[in-house]
Amino acid sequence: MTQEQIDTLIIGGGQAGLAMSAQLSARGLPHLVLERARIAERWRSERWDSLVANGPAWHDRFPILDFPDLEPHVFAPKERIAAYFEQVAEMTKTPIRCGVEVLSVTPQAEGYRVETSQGVIEARNVVAATGPFQKPLIPEAVPESAGVMQVHSSGYKNPAQLPEGAVLVVGAGASGSQIADELLRAGKTVYLSVGPHDRPPIRYRGRDFCWWLGVLGHWDAKTRRAGMEHVTIAVSGARGGHTVDFREFAARGMVLLGRIGAYKDGVMQVAADLAKNIEAGDRHYLATLAEADVYAKAQGLDMPEEPEAHVIGPMPGCVTHPLRELDLAKAGITAIVWATGFALDYGWLKADVFDDKGRPRHERGVTQQKGLYFLGLPWLASRASPFIWGVWRDADYLAEQIAK
């Protein structure tokens, strides 16, 4: 077992860790990155096979490197994203050690003692860059005795992985809506539980949603209204990118449900909130279009109007006459995919910087514990914070704080 000293230790070799390393290197600040597996491991092994980025190649990248082999408006496959981050690491000469697990980080009188699977490191600064996708959340609703296969979205790979029969997908953000669509196209009978969500247009008046959210200032938003911090975004880059439309899902045979409730004797209760959730998503969609129209007019932009984009069709029958309970056996459901998000897991960080729900207390990633920083979390500094290009800005700010 070895022991060494380092000025700044970055924990995590994904987009946040690589961005932090690049920003420190640009300032000539010594540091080391530790990654428990491989660079961008979650893109490699914790996503489904057909996943592509939800933003186009011109947008979902660091400013120091583009995708020279992709057209700007293509949505990069997950393997290309992983290769991209390897290119970033090589380009910036990231001092990274893969296959090293951090066991504990403990504050000392000066700096931190970091116990790893390969020895002890003493660091003056520590940046926790493990991101928001740490611990898959699977509600303890359906017991194993129910006899159905249960998998989190991070463990789902493809339709062939699931047994014959219908599938219940719980969660209708980007992951849930894309997985449900893929299963439906594979010939599965699909039930989709739809909760609160935002539903931006993938393209409008010749521009993609990333461009619109930028010029409209949405990426720079600092906070959301109370209780809306975790509302998911239903968007998809699959098959060239498309606006998620739950009505279209229903027209192809998908059964939409409200939020899933208690389970008993083979039957799941279903909340009476389906229409409300879809209507709220529609309002978000239409509000984005209206805001875009105002902006285009005010700026005098020569963009063709799209009145047809404002047309919202009638609610499908599964929404106007929703199921209030779901008998799994009668519905033929043999598998459940839980697209229910992730929880933070900082059990290895022995510092008094968390609230009663285990969330880090910080100001733009800077904690009250000297030398301890967080990076890559949702709303760390703005709405853009957990995204590839957004984490670059936050890393720039933290590097400045460390340099001081």
Image: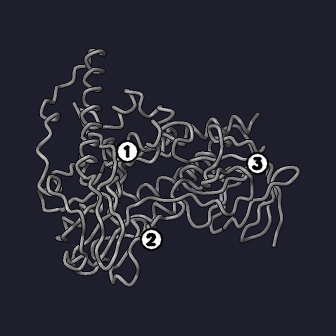
According to the picture, the residue beneath numbered tag 1 turns out to be: 57
Q: Is residue 284 above or below residue 353?
A: above
How far, Cα to Cα, is label 3 from label 2?
38 Å
Question: Which x, y percent locates residue 388?
Answer: 48, 45
**Relative to 402, is 60 on the left or the right?**
left
What amino acid is labelled 2 in the image?
Answer: Glu
Question: Which x, y percent locates residue 277?
Answer: 28, 48
Question: Element at badge 2?
Answer: loop
**Relative to 216, is 297 on the left or the right?**
left
Residues 380 and 38: in front is 380
Pair 3/2: label in front: 2
Q: Determine which of the numbered discs, if any, sits on residue 125 in the image.
A: 3
Q: Is residue 107 above or below residue 221?
A: below
How far, Cα to Cα, is label 1 from label 2?
38 Å
Residue beneath the point at 58% across and 67% down:
37
Residues 395 and 152: in front is 152
According to the picture, the residue beneath numbered tag 2 turns out to be: 140
Question: Element at badge 3?
Answer: strand
Answer whether labels 1 and 2 touch (C-beta < 8 Å): no
Mark 1, residues whose alpha carbon is within 10 Å: few (<14), some, or many (≥20)? Answer: many
Tell me if residue 16 can be seen. Answer: yes
Question: Which x, y percent locates residue 62?
Answer: 50, 42
Residue beneath the point at 21% across and 49% down:
245
What amino acid is labelled 1 in the image?
Answer: Ala
Residue beneath the point at 81% across and 73% down:
1
Residues 369 and 92: in front is 369
Q: Earlier in the sequence, mark 3 or mark 2?
A: 3
Tell me if residue 21 can be seen. Answer: no
Residue beneath the point at 77% across and 61% down:
114
Pair 1/2: label in front: 2
